[in-house]
Image (tube, helix red, strand yellow):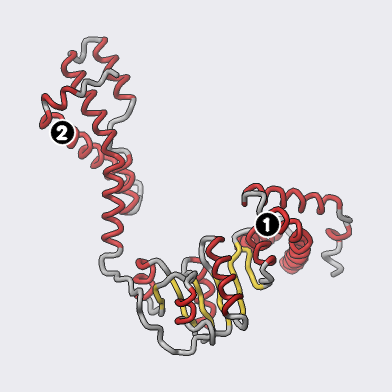
Amino acid sequence: MAVDLGLLIEFPLEILSAVVALIGVKAAIIYGLVRVFGGTERVRSQVAILLSQGGEFAFVLFTAARGEGILDPDLNAFLLVVVSISMMTTPLLLMLQSKWFAKTINANVTEPLNEQFEDDGGRVIITGFGRFGQVVGRLLFANKIKVTILERDASQIAFLRKFGYKVYYGDATQLELLRAAGAASAEAIVVCADSPEEVMEIVSLCQLHFPNLKILARARSRVEANELLGHNVEGFSRETFMSALDLGKQALIALGMHPYKAKRAEAFFRKLDEMRLHELQPHHSEDVLAASRTKEARLELEELFDLEMKGDTERHQSWNRE
């Protein structure tokens, strides 16, 4: 309410020049500080833009300064307008920056929407070649297995092709793309998409149109694992569970347990958890439409812990016997 926007009409050039100076000087200082502390080029520019505007505390400072007679009323009003306008520029600057990043990253990338797949007899199709899919792909490549990779991120394709990967652009939820990629003749498809919804859509497509295709899928958690079980997909990997289980095994070893015994404990716990997963799967099917993913995961975990607590302690003491 203290901002006099009439000054913008009266002194447009002076105010706009002051806004540019404020944003420019502050962004340059912040950019330099982030660079000193080791931020990447992208991080430096993002932080500089995010913090380049004046802040709300300026209103407090200007009011106090005016009350003490440090700022005269005219200069105080001028500075208030400058700070207010600088705050309004942040969303616009972020939008422009995002467009700039997209342009520079994809500068040499063209999206071959209609590119032809080579008939090289790929035995496996991998959909989604991010960090998860790359691990799967590297293992298959290392064992001389021909793979067809589908990826929808054009910049990711350009990056991967620099390292010799044969990657095709396309959305694997499209039936015709799967046909063109050789889903009818391939032996297996490994669904590594980031989105659980996309994973299930691809699984459903493959089950309906390519019944002979072996389906393996990425499951982020027990919730996604239950959904895959509901579609009769037994070949899946719970990334969070597997990495956490491995870390738990390392914790046992660090606490003095023999590595072989820790490995057996890990294997038994995995077997027990998979058994619980199948036991709770019918409950998941009943609740999946009524609960959100977060709520469902919490309820399922409560059931799992309840079963564990009520179970016979012999299960936990049998690691050395089984």
Q: Quadrant of the N terminus?
A: top left
Residue in the foreground of this view, choosing between 147 and 67: 147
> Would you place residue 43 above or below residue 107 in this image?
above
Given residues 95 and 239, the one toward you in this image is 95
C-alpha distance separating marks 2 and 1: 59 Å
User: Secondary structure beneath disc 2?
Assistant: helix
Residue found 24% across the figure and 31% down from its top:
85
* Residue 127 against residue 221 in the figure, above or below: below
Viewer can see residue 27 = yes
| Type of amino acid at the residue the image marks with label 2 | Leu
In screen coordinates, is 138 left or right of 233? left
Q: Residue 228: horizontal and vertical position, in percent?
A: 65, 66
Give x and y (percent) for residue 81. 22, 25
Instruction: Establish if 267 lies above or below 184.
Output: above
Q: Position of residue 135 (x, y in %)?
A: 52, 71
Q: Nearer the viewer, residue 70 or 291?
A: 291
Does residue 135 appear left or right of residue 299 in this picture?
Answer: left
Residue at image point 58% right, 80% down = 210
Residue receiving disc 2: 16
